[in-house]
Amino acid sequence: MSPGSLLKKISMFEALSIKDREELAQLLRYQTIKKGEILFRKGDEGTALYLIKSGRIRIVLKVRLEDEMTLAVLSDGDFFGEMSLLDGLPRSADASAHEDTELYVLNRTDFIRFLMHSEHAMKAILYTLSTRLRKTDDLLGETAFLNISSRLAKRLVELAETRGIHQAGSMHVELTLTQKELASLVGVSRESINKELKRWRARNLVATSRNRLIITDLAAIRKHVR
Ligand code: CMP
């Protein structure tokens, strides 16, 4: 996909005329990042906005050396890195590649200049910020009021729906996922997720191997979601 075609798919840029879109496309720099690499860390200076051409980027908050919380997993057509460009403060979270990822990079000055000239872009960015804040509010509510069992069930049902390989006519769903990743998605320590999964294995709800988790009874797990 050319930078111009990608811009057309991103709400912030969709209202641009063909000429303006082509002009903006000229300002984008192509960058690739390998699975597991860190693009930037919380506290770094924000110098650019990133658009995802293909792949997936994890936005992560590191709590302690071992523990982290995944705030979002962004994919094709999403953008990130706008917050520090808008408020002038350092990066609010880490961004790393969840898989090999292709990006387009727009430097800060070009992004701000573009935003100042486009009411549509301003509205689109506010829309995205509110959507992300709503999701984060939900996550905060879950963390404060739901126990680990309910949170784990909720995340596994979401993962089964978005990333799971379902076996026809059965409640078995296979997920490629490490326990570290799962702990980060639920927002608990690795030890806590280990303990919970042990209980779930004993009840035949899941089976686990090194980087795979098999949901053996999705219907039963759905019942845990409150
Ligand atoms: P910035 O603070 O520049 O760098 C980290 C980026 O992660 C941030 O901009 C946003 O683009 C993104 N981000 C931060 N917090 C969240 C969140 N709660 N949900 C989704 N994306 C986020």
Image: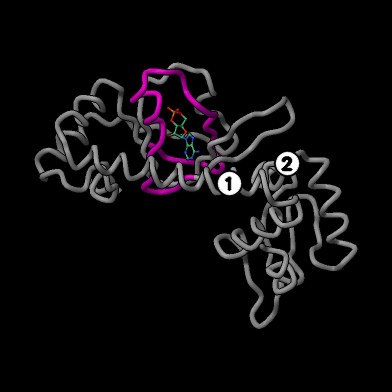
> Are the residues flagged by discs 1 and 2 in contact, CB closer than 8 Å?
no
Residue 33's label in the rendered image is none
User: Is 107 drawn above or below residue 190 in the view shown?
Assistant: above
Q: Residue at the location (54% across, 34% down)? A: 96
Mark whose residue sits in front, 1 or 2: 1
Pick whichever of labels 1 and 2 is earlier in the sequence.
Answer: 1
Name the side, left or right, on which 48 lies relative to 140.
Answer: left
Residue drawn at the location 50% of the way across and 28% of the way down? 39
Answer with the quarter of the image where residue 209 lies: bottom right
Q: Looking at this view, is 155 or 131 the one in front? A: 131
Residue annotated with mark 1: 139
Does residue 16 appear left or right of residue 135 in this picture?
left
- Numbered disc 1: secondary structure: helix
- Between the residue at mark 1 and the residue at mark 2, the CA separation in whole angstroms equals 12 Å
**Picture quarter containing residue 108?**
top left
Between 33 and 57, the one nearer to me in the picture:
57
**Residue under the image location 57 percent in, 65 percent down:** 161
How busy is the neighbourhood of tag 1: few (under 14 within 10 Å), some, or many (20 plus)?
Answer: some
Q: Is mark 1 within 8 Å of ligand 1?
A: yes
User: Within 10 Å of the Cα at label 2, are there few (<14), some (14-19), or many (20+) other Cα atoms?
Assistant: many
Residue occupying the far front of the picture: 145
Mark 2: which secondary structure? loop
Q: What x and y, as percent, mark residue 175?
A: 67, 59
What is the span of residues highlighted in magenta in the rendered image? Answer: 74-103
**Magenta stretch encompasses residue 75:** yes
Q: In this orientation, does residue 2 appear? A: no
Residue annotated with mark 2: 188
**Residue 22, position in %: x, y?**
15, 39
- Label 2 CB-ligand 1 distance < 8 A: no
Does residue 85 show up magenta in the picture? yes
Whether residue 180 is visible: yes
